[in-house]
Image (cartoon, coloured by chain):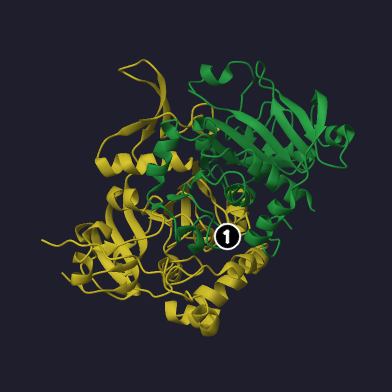
Chain colours: A green, B yellow
Amino acid sequence: MTPRQIMVVAAAREIRDGEIVFVGMRLPLLGFAVAKATHAPAAVGLFENGVIRDTPPAGALITMGDPPNIAGAVMCTTLLEVMSHLERGRVDVGFLGGAQVDRFGNLNTTWVEEGGRRVRLPGSGGAADIAALSRRTVVIMQHERRRFPERVGYLTSPGYGTGGRWRSEVGLVRGGPCRVITSLGVLGFDAESGEMVLERVHPGVTVDDVRAQTGWDLRVASPLSTTPEPTIEELAVLRRFDPDGTWAG
Amino acid sequence: MDKVMPLRDAVSGYVRDGARIAMGTGLESCIPFAAGHEIIRQRRRDLTLVGAISDILFDQLIGAGCVARVIAAWVGNVGAGIAYNFRRAVESEVPGPLAMEDHSNMTVALALEAAARGVPFLPSRTGLGSDIVHGHRRLREITCPFTGERLLGVGALELDLAVIHVPRCDAAGNAHLWGNLGITLEAARAARTVVLTCEEVVDEAVIRSDPNRTLIPGFLVSAVAVAPFGSHPSPTQGYVNRDDRFYDEYHAETRTRDGFLGWLDRMVLGTADHDAYLARVGRTRVEGLRPRTARLAAPVNYGL
């Protein structure tokens, strides 16, 4: 199996049955489909383009606006109406990706430095909203040193800011990241300080591998565990929704 | 009132240089590419483009030199990620400088909703703690006059024009929409006027048979242009599926400025109109995007 398959399945397992899920694009979209088809049949997915679904999409998707995500949905409405559920506090978990995530789970999808040059990225989309307003968020990232700086140069979507009580100090009423699922492992956050902590490594990955790809002195949980491998059932569902391995190949 | 006219006339009549225009309000579907290409052919300049997720239409208009400013949450290629013309314009002022007003999806939607209601701002709990808000002309931290809580004030964003691709409408511009709506309804109401492109113009009796599905009333609309496949390569539910390969090809070909100029000449400037564009894409390829099976909604009864 590929690291991306492990990531998608780990993401799927973050969704509990019956939860309201703000689904992102790409890997989280697949994770939602896997969760729905396995352990979380009663989960409901909200998509920022206005779609609400409680069944896996009718076919493979590249974007949330593709016809298989519309056909058989329970509701198609406006972005603002879906966002109202998020703002009201009804969304249990939101999925996020990004170019960079830092020590306190802040995400950058706007500007990065590469080789001394400023590089412009596409921007927030709905990520800043999901990060601010979900009850909890799960971040999915490739684990590379340039993607894990100690502090993001531009804070697009808030995690725990500078740590501690930062979220409530800036006026955020709830939420924050609970997991970062990477190509190397699964990280959580210290409840007091808001700092990222390595909790699990994927099969065959060492703590040193993870530290080498992290831009600060990463805390490691004790005991550290290994990510359970995807089941045959989970992998079968994954292949159904990503038949060509476009996203998780 | 019959507002149906050729797309060329709709663009020449209603898209002015320097205008603030919302396009691509469906986020990843119903993107008005046919109208955008005609704007490029007619060489409009200094436009401000407003959107949430831009698909690749903004990238094409930016690369063609039509755009001075973008007000949006995400500018990229929904299939492949990066949009190279946008990057070249923001990073290196190629083909010209581009001012960027960053938003989140929710703040741009609220800014349009405020304009749609004619109020100066709307409050929200989003955006707090994000660098997007710092020094922003339209986003400001405020204190709630009722509870004293810290909130985000989202200033109104009025539009000169919204260009919207719809599945079907009547000749007066009363439009039936289905599928995800994105920020379409807010944009239509925030704009001084609306230009519709549609897959088909239907008799007004079709519209009146299901008034709940009429989401844009004709009194907002100035022009209706019939443009089948007008959202290509993005989908319009029930009429055309997404041309996924097109996004990857565009991504590869527009990596360099010269590559983009070649693409632009071949696909837009070198095609006289939308029909010629579709012929250039390939009739067989385009027809292959038609849905293979129908999924009809059950009729509803408006009986007396």
Q: Residues within 10 Å of mark 1 (few under 14, many from 20)?
A: many
Q: Position of residue B185 (x, y in %)?
A: 32, 51
Question: Does any portion of residue B11 appear in the rendered image?
Answer: no
For the C terminus of chain A, the quadrant is bottom right
Question: Does any portion of residue A114 appear in the rendered image?
Answer: yes
Tell which of A1 and A169 is nearer to you.
A1
Who's the residue at 33% across and 61% down the image? B177
Q: Classify residue A198 as left or right of residue B77.
A: right
User: Can you tell which quarter of the image residue B82 is in?
Assistant: bottom right
Q: Position of residue A32 (x, y in %)?
A: 59, 48
Tell which of B286 and B279 is nearer to you.
B286
Q: Classify residue B94 as left or right of residue A183.
A: left
Q: Which amino acid does label 1 sit on?
A: Leu
User: Can you tell which quarter of the image residue B171 is in?
Assistant: bottom left
Tell which of B123 and A36 is nearer to you.
A36
Who's the residue at 52% across and 30% down the image? A135
Q: Mark 1 lies on which chain?
A: A
Q: Is residue B172 above or below residue A90?
A: below
Who's the residue at 61% across and 24% down the image? A161
Q: Classify residue B217 as left or right of residue B105.
A: left
- Total marks shown come to 1
Q: Is residue B237 above or below residue B121?
A: below
Q: Where is residue B170 in the image (x, y as percent from the top left)?
A: 23, 70
Q: Where is residue B157 in the image (x, y as percent from the top left)?
A: 35, 42
- Label 1 secondary element: loop
Q: Is residue B75 above or below residue B114?
A: below
Residue topped by disc 1: A61
